[in-house]
Image (spheres, coloured by chain):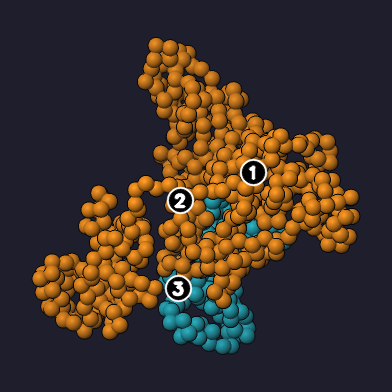
Amino acid sequence: MVKILIKLSEALVAKPTTAEIILEHKVPINIITAQVTSKGGDYLVEIPDESLATVVTAFRKKGATVTLPKLIEIDKDKCFNCGACVSICPVEAITVAQDKSVNFDQEKCVGSTCSACVEACPARAIVSVKQNNHELENNQH
Amino acid sequence: MKKLVESSGVEVAFREVDVVTTGTFGAMCSSGAIINVGHSDPPMKIEKAWINDVPICHPGAAVDLYIGATAMSEREPFEYGGGHIIEDLVGGKEVELKATAYGTDCYPRTQVKTRLTKDDLNQFYLLNFRNCYQRYNCAVNARDETIYTYMGKLLPKLSNANFSGAGELNPLMNDPDYETIGIGTRIFLGGAQGYVIGEGTQHDPKNRFGTIMVRGDAKQMSPEFLRGASFTRYGNTLYVGLGIPIPILNEGLAKKTAIRDEEIFTNVVDYSVPRKDRPALGRVSYKELKSGAITVNDRRIKVSSLSSLKTARKIAGTLKSWVEHGEFFLTVPVERLPIDSVFKPMRQTAETPFVASVMQTAVTCYETDEIRAIAERMVTLSVNHIIVVDDGDKLDGIVTSWDITRALAEGKTALVDIMTRRVVTAKPDEPLEAASRRMAQHNISALPVIDAKRKVLGIVTAEDVSKLLGR
């Protein structure tokens, strides 16, 4: 199981966002902590590892912000900007910039349970950091 | 050059431009370095050698060694290899040399262990026998499981694609008839100046797959342009930075160096087919490849570059600045690269066995058959595998004697509860080695042989394979 933090805007709180995702994708989502008012809020949920990409993408599609603790680290000195990791990434967290640098978006990354990029990196510049739930809890406001 | 030719025409471009610089930075496996480590006292004729636990070739006399880029560490295979040693040495790091010998009257020493840096070496030359492929295939995987290749990690069912090469920036693409490139051409190699010493192995000019053999003083090079690399479950290699200045000697060269990515095409090749000639599923331009997605069979596939276009640009830029500042002088090759040589496949004097040659008639059953009847057939026909087919003889699943045992233990009576539906299969025209490897990978002892429409043609078992391959 993996924990993620979801932030909902006022508009999203007004709708049964989480219920819709559970029904649409038939995934179990267990709410651990929640601080939600009619103005919006955030809550920590637990989901099965294999549903991570699906759930994160689904929440983002609806406009929610999904955050995780730092799970993937890129060593900029080792990376030689080939881009082998780009097409492997299921959530498009890795992209090629105009100047052909490889950019990594921590916000989009679904982290160590995916780690598809780690073994695809010829420079071995990508390291998967074990998920630290404590760090995630500190992320809450 | 590209913009100038477009806006002002070839004639003006020819008059105004003297040199076009090019660059590429990619995995070039047929690379390595020749080193001379000096003589020990007492002297030794090295027989076997390792640097940082990577086996090193000893092709010549006493203390000349060749570090092959793809040699893998015996302690950390796939993670550290010859390419990494070259990067470490170039970067000024100390490496550990271990060597053994049988000992002779003139070279009595039988073992040595020491630490060396590039400054301790007499010669340290990068000596690459095949670099700088003019263009390369775009790799995909049509099979239903991830494969790991020298073209990187390829996800199942064409879920991603990988390509290599700098396209319009590639040195040989800018002088495709090798008017200015040949033995003695001075080039950018690994951050220093090096030379082309001839055509590379597998040079295939007619198909626009030209290659070059190069040499350069590695002591002058930089690890920014020489990087050891690891391809998961494939092996180690070296990323090499290489650039060639093309003098614009005539209007033809002005036109040729104006080549654009949209004019350079390559095939999308299915790397899941374990053959020398793999099927091409389509044709794409380097422009499409560099855009991040290609279309194959009406499907959009995300595509990654395995070589660094950013570093390739930096190489072309550095070379340009060297030329402009008089730090680099162009040379006339003493002999041009061949333009008509051919790249032949191996002459094989023994026949390669294929699945079709050992395949046997499969015993089949239907999903609705009773387990007891299936068990009886296994005993009567003395087989361990029965293939489950539909009315049209198409593969539905497989049931093994082990499944029957399990059914008995768990009290199951319906075939559908015990049969395996996700079946690993083989094709009749597949080399037996490939089928055998797949059985070992999945820890199974038989593969149903099917055609393109999943119709069952037979079965190949581990027993039959070992009889033929002698394992």
SS of the residue under disc 2: loop
Circle nearer the viewer, 1 or 2: 1
**Chain B drawn colour:** orange
Residue shown at 59%/49% (left/top)? B204
The numbered dot on residue A51 is: 3
Q: Chain of mark 3?
A: A
Q: Chain of mark 2?
A: B
- Specify whether residue B100 is in view: yes
Residue shown at 57%/58% (left/top)? B137
Residue sitting farthest toward the bottom: A15
Front residue of B284 and B216: B284
Question: In the rendered structure, which amino acid carries the disc numbered 3?
Answer: Ser
The chain that appears cyan in the image is A
Q: Residues within 10 Å of mark 1 (few under 14, many from 20)?
A: some
Question: In the rendered structure, which amino acid carries the disc numbered 2?
Answer: Tyr
Circle nearer the viewer, 3 or 1: 1
Distance from Cα at disc 2 to Cα at disc 3? 29 Å
Task: Indicate left or right for B318 with B351 as reference.
Answer: right
**Residue position for label 1:** B338
Q: Residues within 10 Å of mark 2 (few under 14, many from 20)?
A: some
Distance from Cα at disc 1 to Cα at disc 2? 32 Å
Circle nearer the viewer, 2 or 3: 2
Front residue of B35 and B357: B357
Residue shown at 50%/86% (left/top)? A20
**Residue position for label 2:** B234
The answer to whether residue B72 is above or below residue A43 is: above
Task: Indicate left or right for B47 with A18 as reference.
Answer: left
Front residue of A121 and A40: A121
Front residue of B174 and B204: B204
